[in-house]
Image: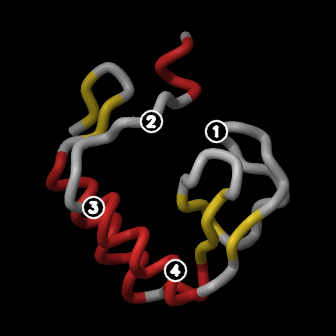
Amino acid sequence: MAVMGRISMKAREEAARKIVERPQDFKICEGCESIVVASVDLCPNCHAYCFNLSQDDVIKHAEILGAREQQSVTSEDLL
C-alpha cells in the first residue's frame, strides 16, 4: 500500500523478489541508484542516462533496497 508516495515494506520486499528472479530485466541508475526496467533510456526519477547493467549488482542492490524503508524522493513526492 502506498502512502503519500511511499511504498510499504511488504511491497518493497515483493518488488525486490521479482527483480532478483529476473535481474536481466532491470538496471541501476548511476544518477540516483534507482532500479529501473532495462528498456528505459532515461531514469524516470532523475532523468539520468547512465546505467549499471551488471546482473550481480542489480541483485545485490535489490536485496538492499528491499530490506529498508524508502529513502529516495520520487516524482510523486514533488506534486
Mark linked to residue 66? 3
- Disc with the residue nearer the chain's start (3 vs 2): 3
* Three-letter residue code for mark 4: Asp
Label 4 or label 2, whichever comes before in sequence order:
4
**Distance from label 3 to label 1 (Cα)?**
18 Å
Mark earlier in primary sequence (3, 1): 1
Q: Is 72 on the left-hand or right-hand side of 32?
A: left
| Residue topped by disc 1 | 45
**Left-right relation of 56 to 68:** right
Categorize mark 4 by other alpha carbons within 10 Å: few (<14), some (14-19), many (20+): some
| Label 3 close to label 1 by CB (< 8 Å) | no
Mark 2 Cα within 10 Å, few/some/many (few <14, many 20+)?
few
The residue at the point 55 percent across, 10 percent down is: 79
Q: Residue at x 69, y 43 (%)?
A: 44
Kindly report the distance in space between the C-alpha atoms of the residues bearing marks 1 and 2.
9 Å
Answer above or below: position of 40 versus 22.
above
